């Protein structure tokens, strides 16, 4: 039975007699003197008892371990601050920097700031499901680790930490052709993980074919070909730092090392850095890069790759709607909207802004190709916004590398934990309990 409670009407309350003893401010004391307002018992001063103070005096022993510091980090930006303190300038800047004036990277991050979430209320969000299917297989989270080169330069655990953290989190890990751990070693380190391989196509088909065969033999189910590197971008931080692989012991690096002894100890006491997927080739870093970035590539090369690789094929570096449609027409199972983290063409299109148009175009073509997005992601809220606007999945590069530099494998785990918590909280506040409930109506791009 429903009970209706009627509020009392203060106008019907009898007024106190003028001679009454005051019980509240505003009444008159006998003789017409103004009455002092009564002080509630809770506001009267008293000497505190020990029993009152004891619950407040719960002092914790200070913790200065790396694990404690990682646990205290609640955002990817805080992991970045830790990474900067622990890592020499050249490898940190290699990760943190972008091309030329770094306008593209700045705009990519600002794109996620310039949105408005539009939450629904009175929905049951007691349980949040972040799982999804990507390229025919389940993923516990809608995010994977992007391919990053020279990873053991950032921190000695490198690709091993990334692949094992991804395995533990139930998400894909992508090994770069420029990685510092081999395809076989990564597969052995994370035998139950979903391992992907990223490829730069060469004019020399034998080199490419060898890597493709090794990736297939090692159990990689997805090949990600990067197509936005006709030439190397102008990464000016690297130029100014005189960065080399391995880092050179110049006067500047020696001084830098004095502030980061742990990094140098790890670097000097582990196996020297090599391009593990290219170990049988010799030459300088510049020679290797120039051999990879082939300016003659066309869609005919993509056709050759589609015929050669029997697993899932994803094309990374899509920056226009037309190219997204075209690579799907040439057999791609997925497209990665990416400007290489702003590391190639400065003032390049922003993937997050491109996303709605690509999603609309591929739906119009009745395509089931996966839409994957990277560049600029620094929080779980960024990931949820991308999914709402049409992405099936996202990749993180810098976000996980900051964790790696901050604390090795434990730091990568922490980065993924932060993103997972962000995603779950954002979804609950939006009023959705599973990813399929996200729609473009949940996000508005400000200024549009």
Image (cartoon, rainbow, N blue to C red):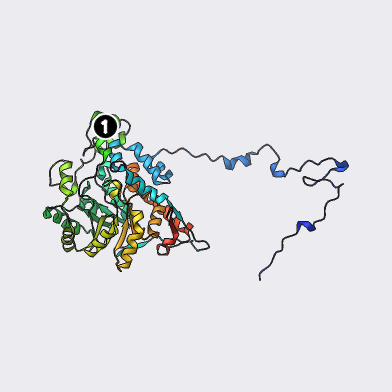
The residue drawn where x is 35% and y is 40% is 83
The reply to whether residue 281 is visible in this rendering is yes
- Is residue 442 rendered to the left or right of residue 189? right
The reply to whether residue 155 is visible in this rendering is no
Quadrant in which the N terminus is drawn? bottom right
Quadrant in which the C terminus is drawn? bottom left
Q: Which of 44 and 324 is in front in this view?
A: 324
Residue 132, position in %: x, y? 36, 62
Label 1 CA crowd tier, 10 Å (few <14, some 14–19, many 20+): some
Q: Quadrant of residue 187?
A: bottom left
Residue 89, position in %: x, y? 30, 36
Q: In which quarter of the image is residue 100?
A: top left
Q: Which of 330 and 251 is in front in this view?
A: 330
Residue 381, position in %: x, y? 42, 53
Q: Nearer the viewer, residue 306 or 24?
A: 306
Q: Mark 1 points at which residue?
A: 253
- Is residue 20 rendered to the left or right of residue 269? right
Residue 219, position in %: x, y? 22, 59
Vertical placement of residue 209 versus 41, above or below: below
The residue drawn where x is 13% and y is 42% is 283
- Is residue 379 rendered to the left or right of residue 302? right
């Amino acid at each position: 039975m429903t009970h209706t409670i009627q509020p009392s009407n203060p106008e019907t309350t009898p007024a106190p007699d003028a001679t009454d003893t005051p019980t509240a401010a505003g009444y008159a004391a006998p003789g017409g003197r103004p009455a002092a307002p009564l002080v509630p018992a809770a506001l009267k001063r008293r000497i505190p008892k020990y029993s009152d103070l004891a619950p407040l005096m719960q002092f914790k022993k200070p913790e200065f371990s790396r694990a404690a510091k990682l646990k205290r980090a609640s955002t990817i930006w805080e992991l970045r601050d830790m990474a900067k303190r622990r890592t020499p300038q050249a490898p940190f800047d290699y990760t943190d920097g972008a091309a030329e004036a770094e306008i593209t990277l700045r705009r990519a991050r600002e794109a996620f700031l310039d949105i408005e979430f539009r939450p629904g209320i009175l929905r049951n969000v007691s349980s949040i499901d972040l799982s999804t299917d990507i390229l025919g297989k389940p993923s516990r989270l809608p995010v994977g680790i992007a391919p990053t080169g020279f990873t053991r330069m950032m921190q000695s655990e490198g690709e091993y930490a990334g692949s094992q953290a991804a395995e533990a989190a139930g998400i894909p890990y992508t090994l770069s052709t420029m990685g510092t751990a081999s395809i076989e070693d990564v597969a052995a380190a994370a035998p139950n993980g979903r391992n992907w391989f990223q490829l730069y196509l060469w004019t020399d088909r034998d080199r490419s074919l060898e890597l493709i065969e090794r990736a297939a033999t090692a159990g990689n189910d997805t090949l990600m070909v990067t197509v936005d590197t006709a030439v190397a971008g102008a990464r000016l931080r690297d130029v100014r730092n005189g960065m080399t692989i391995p880092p050179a012991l110049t006067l500047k690096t020696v001084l830098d090392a004095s502030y980061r002894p742990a990094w140098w100890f790890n670097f000097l006491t582990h196996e020297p850095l090599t391009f593990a997927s290219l170990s049988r080739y010799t030459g300088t870093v510049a020679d290797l890069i120039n051999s990879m970035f082939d300016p003659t590539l066309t869609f005919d090369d993509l056709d050759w790759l589609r015929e050669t690789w029997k697993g899932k094929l994803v094309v990374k570096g899509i920056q226009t709607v037309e190219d997204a449609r075209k690579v799907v027409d040439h057999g791609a199972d997925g497209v990665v909207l990416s400007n290489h983290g702003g590391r190639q063409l400065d003032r390049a299109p922003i993937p997050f802004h491109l996303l709605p148009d690509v999603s609309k175009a591929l739906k119009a073509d009745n395509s089931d190709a996966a839409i994957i997005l990277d560049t600029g992601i620094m929080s779980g809220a960024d990931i949820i916004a991308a999914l709402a606007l049409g992405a099936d999945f996202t990749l993180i590069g810098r976000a996980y590398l900051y964790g790696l530099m901050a604390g090795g494998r434990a730091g990568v785990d922490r980065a993924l934990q932060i993103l997972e918590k962000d995603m779950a909280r954002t979804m609950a506040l939006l009023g959705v309990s599973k990813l399929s409930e996200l729609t473009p109506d949940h996000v508005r791009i400000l200024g549009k």
